[in-house]
Amino acid sequence: MVAASLLAACKDTKHRTTVEGPLEPGKYELAFVVDSLSIPIELHINDNGHWTLVNWTEHIALDSMQWKDSTFFAKLPFFNTTLSGKVLSKTSFEGSWTDLTREEHYEIPVKGIKKDLPDYPANGQPQKLMFDVLFSPYDPPAHDDAIALLYRYDSLLYGTFLTRSGDHRFLQGRYYETDNTLQLSGFDGAHLFHYKASITGDSIYGMFYSGKHYSTNWIGVRNELAQLQHPDSIVGLIDPNLEFRFKVRSESGDSVIFDRDKLKGHVTIVQVAGSWCANCMDESRFLKKLYESYSNQGLQIIPVHFERAEDFDAALKQVKRQHDEMGLPFAAYFGGAAGKGYASKVFPNIQRITAYPTAIFIDKKGEVRKIHSGFYGPGTGDYHAIYTTELESFVQMLLSEPEQ
């Protein structure tokens, strides 16, 4: 079963030292307050005081919890965001989540209360629901095709949304049979997602909220064979006859030009990424495994980061922190500010880059052989397994080719 198979891969097993806190152990509901919305996220506190965010089968350990009397502060893993607050009682607290990557003071209030939340039914057999989805259906320039991939266990609901730029990662919530409505939420430290919808027959109508800065309508129709445009066919080269080359900055701040002479003799994956991007994090984990398996055969990985921090030193600090936490064995490079337009300036011979991440596959001759938009992470189950297998097979094929 897809959902159950993700549990072992995503559950945190990292050894942690004991961190004492004044809250009782157990399950808590974090309510992120956005205007009239209360977005629920599950939190576990164990007997040693360790905090773990829970999204479906993804467990995110908050290892950096710091306490001073009844107040707490944590830098969330991998991303430049924080969670802070104060304890109100042995079973409740309040505080805020702050995203330090955004220019404005981006802060969302959070309330936590101990609750008897249900366990994930790892051994159950869910009802699988798939919908062809369109986000922003009433705003044609903002249209975004997607697939809703949902698993229903009676009143419990889990799943994700697949889009042409990646996926919405691990989501969980409730299905209310009395009025055929649903709610889903997910919080990975970088993104706070919430979905509300009503189902009528085979049709679904809903609202999507991303933090406090974005919301839109979405509609869908039941389709067990739903498909999206293949990620390899979304972006291509403008002129295949031109030499592929690009200019970036190294970790030392120096300019580096990668051209055919520098790329020849290797199989190269250039990753267009950002440290603020959770799908990029998922892809980086996959690229790390590829590098560990094939670097001795000539595979090289070149991540090119586009960061929200305009100051180079600030961007470098965050990217290096993320690379260190993930144990990535390859150096980072920098292309400029976050945004699809900036990425296209660094790679002028690529049709407009539409997704973070985007992976550019280059053969031993220094020629682009594939451009893969987005990344289907482990929350997509079979999609993740199929696409990572395909990409690894493609790398193996490139490595087996002669240089000339």
Image (tube, rainbow, N blue to C red):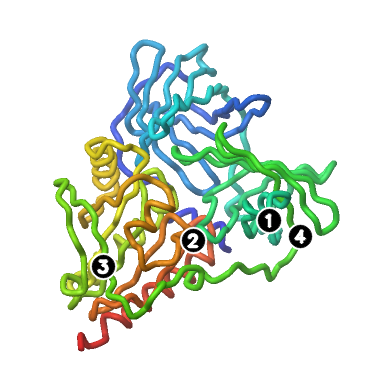
- Give the Cα separation between the discs numbered 3 and 4: 43 Å
* Rendered location of residue 51, percent (x, y): 42, 31
Residue 245 image label: 3
Q: Amino acid at mark 3?
A: Arg
Closer to the camera, 327 or 69?
A: 327
Tell me if residue 211 comes above or below residue 344 in the rendering: above
Tell me if residue 256 comes above or below residue 70 in the rendering: below
Task: Name the residue tied to disc 1.
Answer: 134
- Give the Cα separation between the discs numbered 2 and 3: 27 Å
Q: Amino acid at mark 4?
A: Val
Q: Nearer the viewer, mark 2 or mark 3?
A: 3
Closer to the camera, 93 or 7?
A: 93
Number of residues whose C-alpha sits closer than 10 Å to that of mark 2, classed few (under 14), some (14–19) or many (20 or more): many
Lower position in the chain sequence, tag 1 or tag 2: 1
* Rendered location of residue 130, percent (x, y): 69, 61
Q: Secondary structure at mark 4?
A: strand
Q: Nearer the viewer, mark 1 or mark 4?
A: 1
Contact check, label 2 and label 3, Cβ < 8 Å: no
Asked if one can make out residue 198 in the rendered structure from this viewpoint, the answer is yes
Q: Amino acid at mark 2?
A: Tyr
Closer to the camera, 54 or 146?
A: 146
Task: Name the residue tied to disc 4.
Answer: 221
Lower position in the chain sequence, tag 1 or tag 4: 1
Task: Name the residue tied to disc 2.
Answer: 376
